[in-house]
Image (tube, grey):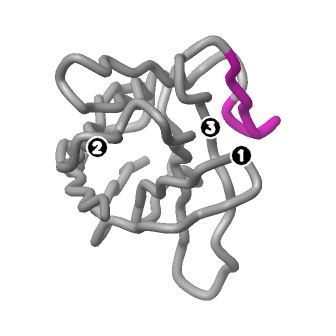
Amino acid sequence: QVQLVESGGGLVQAGGSLRLSCAASGPTFSSYSIGWFRQAPGKERELVARIGSSGGVTYYADSVKGRFTITRDNAKNTVYLQMNSLKPEDTAVYSCAAGLNRFRNDYWGQGTQVTVSS
């Protein structure tokens, strides 16, 4: 069992930055691939970025490449999403999910709101 708690969301002006954190409980955190997802009002949830269990493999959606960076610190049971050059279209609820491989999302956090004003 893994419990995930997101933090770091908030209101920021376009062009600004935020760093989201996904803190996990449980002794097997380092075994899980972690993904950051977002869902804007009226839109489907989309995968923003994903990182492998050891941090060596990452994926980014085209819409965030070059602006967002996903990293993890297994010693702290935490995955981070550094978001730079934020745009109003990045506004959404951001959630993290853990899966035993990159195709699975077995556990979800509650989400954190990111709002980017123009």
- Cα separation, mark 2 vs mark 3, equals 12 Å
Label the magenta part by its dominant secondary structure. Answer: loop
Q: Residues within 10 Å of mark 2 (few under 14, many from 20)?
A: many
For residue 92, above or below residue 52: below
- Residue under label 1, please give it: 102
- Relative side of 54 to 5, left or right: right
**Pointer 3: what residue?**
50
Mark 1 crowd level (few <14, some 14–19, many ≥20, 10 Å Cα): some
> Which residue is rendered at x = 44% and y = 19% of the image?
71
For image coordinates 42% across by 54% down, the residue present is 96
Contact flag, marks 1 and 3 (Cβ < 8 Å): yes
Please report the bounds of the magenta region as a residue range: 57-64
Task: Look at the picture and state if 75 lies above or below 107.
Answer: above
Q: Position of residue 18 (x, y in %)?
A: 30, 31
- The residue under label 3 is which amino acid type? Arg
Looking at the picture, which amino acid does disc 2 mark? Answer: Cys
